[in-house]
Image (tube, grey):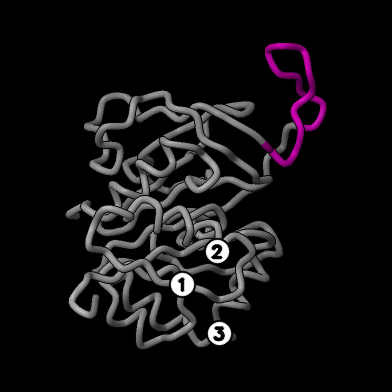
Amino acid sequence: MTNSPILAVVDYGSGNLRSVWQAARHAAADTDWQVVLTQDAAVIRSAHRIILPGQGAMADCMRELRESGLLEPVLRAAESKPLFGVCVGMQMLLDHSEEGDTPSLGLIPGRVQRFRLEGRRQPDGSRYKIPQMGWNRVTRPQGRPAHPMWAGIADGSWYYFVHSYYAQLRDDAHCAGQADYGGLFAAAIARDNLFATQFHPEKSADQGIALYRNFLFWQP
């Protein structure tokens, strides 16, 4: 076990981290990967891959990441190691969030904005609800090769979302998947060794587990 590669799920107090850890363990069950849930900066520094979960308010997540002492190890890991951001963990990769006027990690250019759908109706006549909560289809941007993280996963697969804010990217080339909720938005983003999803793979059945499994073998 000591020679096994390590996938570290960063435990800085976010609400969804245990379910992320359990799903990643399931994805790695028949591999030699060791999936650890950790508050230890040294483990994050030595890990081979990182998952950064996030749930709740952006300001709280950023504060907890700083106060846990894990901000610097995460930033260092993001320089070269494969890193997977989940939900608010995706939003944290951008420059700034409108939620609480919160500066974030600045790893992918863009801002986090609130859905503004008040009074609008969906195609079935129902009103849009904020947050978006439930299943939505994720498609790959047209005209570009699919990101390697989608290997073996059908385009248009359904994933589970819970969010009131979305990523507004500065460069559309960083959009790796999109969904429609009152208009298209970035449901997955990527840059170099970074990949992240607004949806929750750990709540998204087999296609979510497949995404975590792909992360184990992705070679950015």
Give whichever of discs 3 and 1 has the lower sequence position.
Answer: 1
Please state the horizontal and vertical placement of residue 83, each as a whole percent of the image: 34, 62
**Left or right: where 144 falls relative to 36:** left
Report the amino acid beneath label 3. Ser
Q: CA distance from mark 2 to mark 3?
A: 14 Å
Image depth: mark 2 or mark 3 in front: 2
Report the amino acid beneath label 1. Leu
Q: Which residues are magenta?
A: 118-133
Give whichever of discs 2 and 3 has the lower sequence position.
Answer: 2
Q: Residues within 10 Å of mark 1 (few under 14, many from 20)?
A: some
**Element type at marker 1?**
strand
Please tell me which residue lies in front, 143 or 147: 147
Q: Which residue is pictured at 49% across the width and 54% down the height?
A: 86
53 in relation to 144, above or below: below
> Is 129 included in the stretch rendered in magenta?
yes
Say the numbered circle drawn on residue 68. 3
Give whichever of discs 1 and 2 has the lower sequence position.
Answer: 2
> Is 41 included in the stretch rendered in magenta?
no
Report the amino acid beneath label 2. Leu
